[in-house]
């Protein structure tokens, strides 16, 4: 395994780019290959068996690109598939769940944490298990917020409709007196302001991207795999469908436009 | 080909059940096999190539079940894939597009028709071509309404949020003085009241289900394939993922609950 091999990142679609943004910030020398499964997006309403099958196919695709580590930039995959498959492959696999759970446990003062995510993520109760493994006294309150993803993809991040949807979904959580909320889906950082507006400024919003990038950096350092080349790193993007759609949306998630987007068939 | 062979129906997910409801009403003796591609739903944001590939796989699955005719209960497939593939198979294939276009052309008085649908359906401009082939003087005004599907699947058919989204999407159409609107997606009949509320009572809403069922009946009669058996017909449902999710939603689309739902892998 060579240090200049790329980090592989995958997500069901475009949301994982919020993680890529943070990887680029924290690991500016690393080559990155991203795969977005836009032909089968979204995963968040699909069954465990199907999410596992799709995830394995995505991992095999990245392994063929000679990646040195795989970062799963999708909460649904990290919640429902990763526990079953993470030890089966020849490179380390890092999910978004554990880093976000750790950060939330660290942040909470009153031991009341909220979690929002896709129906599959919430149904898996994975965040609850992770948090309670770290501190069994913490109470976790969860809510599925399925309309957030289509709203973000429609670009409606600052509209009355989105604020109304947020009030509807988050209302039950505001009564639970949580002081910390995990944004349990890589799309949700784009709704940070709307969510903070509904919950109030005192609630800590935990966005897994930053913590995941720290974890990736730590693991690469541990295995002596950090890229020390001075060459300009390459960021290459593959999607299973609709490179144009992905390219149009990407800027919103990544903070800058992307160029190198190709179509790749998996499965 | 035997008369008691089933009619095959497919859709990307659950929306096609609005067509099944009408098939059962108009053809109460027919056996029906439905396939919903819930592992890869939705199709409406995906590319032509991908929708064609998925559609062929779905058709091959239905042909294996010995169907005598295939009804494509999905506007996206009918718009972007059907023109390329409909003549390649050994049974007749009926889409939702032509019947709805015919009905709209018949209904309009002022020759101004609106069409709403998924981004892929609208981008294909298929409704415009079909309508203008029938009457080149008709003006067609289209709008993509991507949030309607997730709103219906979330069960938010009668909420302030949905009315606000409808006002946002349909606003530009209200200024165009259309007297007829095609509901160009099999989910949209569930939003009939909200849409009528925004556009006003004078606008005709054309829902393809009824017209498609008429077309299926006509074609079966033509080929002498109507089922004349007195046996209770069988309605069997297959999905590529999440039979429970499908079963929960199905009642809302079909008007009664479904029992016989199995998982089937395609592709």
Image: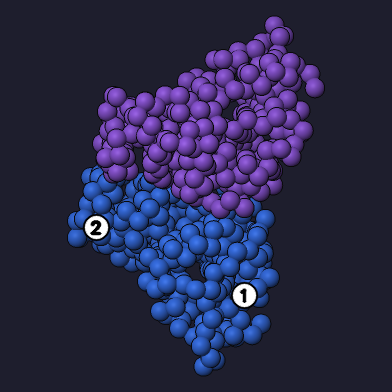
Chain colours: A blue, B purple
Q: Chain of mark 1?
A: A
Q: Is residue A53 left or right of residue B211?
A: right
Q: Residues within 10 Å of mark 2 (few under 14, many from 20)?
A: some
Instruction: Work out which residue is located at the far left of the displayed protein and give it.
Output: A201
Which one is in front, A263 or A69? A263
Q: Is residue B93 left or right of residue B38?
A: right
- Asked if marks 2 and 1 touch (Cβ < 8 Å), the reply is no
Q: Residue at x 42, y 72 (%)?
A: A257
The picture places residue A69, in percent across and down from the top left corner, at 58, 74
Which chain is disc 2 placed on? A
Count of residue discs: 2
Q: Nearer the viewer, residue A14 or A133?
A: A14
Residue at the bottom extreme of this rendering? A230
**Residue A230 rendering spot, x and y as whole percentages:** 51, 93
Is A196 left, or right, of B182 in this rendering? left
User: Relative to B71, is A212 on the left or the right?
Assistant: left
Percent across and percent down for residue B31 are: 67, 19
How many angstroms separate mark 2 from mark 1 (CA)? 37 Å
Q: Looking at the image, which residue is at 43% across and 36% down?
A: B137
Quick one: label 2 or label 1, which is nearer the N terminus? Answer: 1
**Vertical placement of residue A119 versus B3, above or below:** below
Image quarter of the N terminus of chain B: top right
Classify residue B260 by image quadrant. Answer: top right
Q: Quadrant of residue A195?
A: bottom left
Mark 1 Cα within 10 Å, few/some/many (few <14, many 20+)?
Answer: many
| Closer to us: A23 or A179 | A23
- Could one spot residue A50 in this view of the protein? no
Residue under label 1, please give it. A67
Residue with the mark numbered 2? A196
Residue A204 vs B244, above or below: the answer is below
Residue A140: % across, % down: 35, 51
Q: Residue at x 67, y 24 (%)?
A: B7
């Amino acid at each position: 395994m060579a240090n200049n091999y790329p980090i592989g990142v995958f997500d069901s679609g475009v949301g994982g780019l919020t993680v890529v943004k943070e990887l680029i910030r924290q690991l500016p020398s690393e080559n990155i290959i991203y795969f977005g499964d836009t032909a089968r997006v979204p995963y968040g309403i699909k069954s465990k068996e199907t999410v596992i099958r799709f995830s394995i196919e995505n991992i095999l695709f990245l392994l063929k690109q000679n990646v040195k580590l795989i970062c799963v930039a999708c909460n649904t995959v990290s919640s429902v598939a990763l526990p079953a498959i993470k030890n089966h492959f020849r490179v380390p696999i890092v999910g978004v769940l554990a880093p976000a759970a750790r950060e939330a446990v660290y942040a909470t003062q009153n031991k009341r944490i909220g979690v929002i995510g896709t129906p599959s993520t919430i149904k898996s109760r994975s965040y609850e298990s992770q948090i309670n493994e770290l501190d069994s006294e913490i109470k976790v309150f969860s809510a599925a917020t399925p309309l957030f993803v289509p709203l973000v993809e429609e670009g409606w991040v600052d509209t009355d409709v989105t604020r109304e949807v947020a009030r509807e979904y988050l209302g039950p959580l505001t009564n639970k007196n949580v002081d910390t909320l995990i944004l349990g889906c890589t799309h949700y950082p784009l709704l940070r302001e709307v969510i903070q507006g509904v919950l109030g400024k005192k609630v800590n919003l935990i966005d897994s991207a930053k913590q995941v990038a720290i974890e990736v950096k730590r693991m690469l350092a541990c295995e002596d795999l950090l890229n020390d080349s001075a060459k300009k790193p390459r960021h290459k993007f593959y999607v299973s469908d609709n490179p144009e759609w992905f390219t149009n949306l990407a800027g919103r998630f990544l903070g800058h436009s992307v160029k190198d987007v190709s179509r790749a068939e998996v499965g």
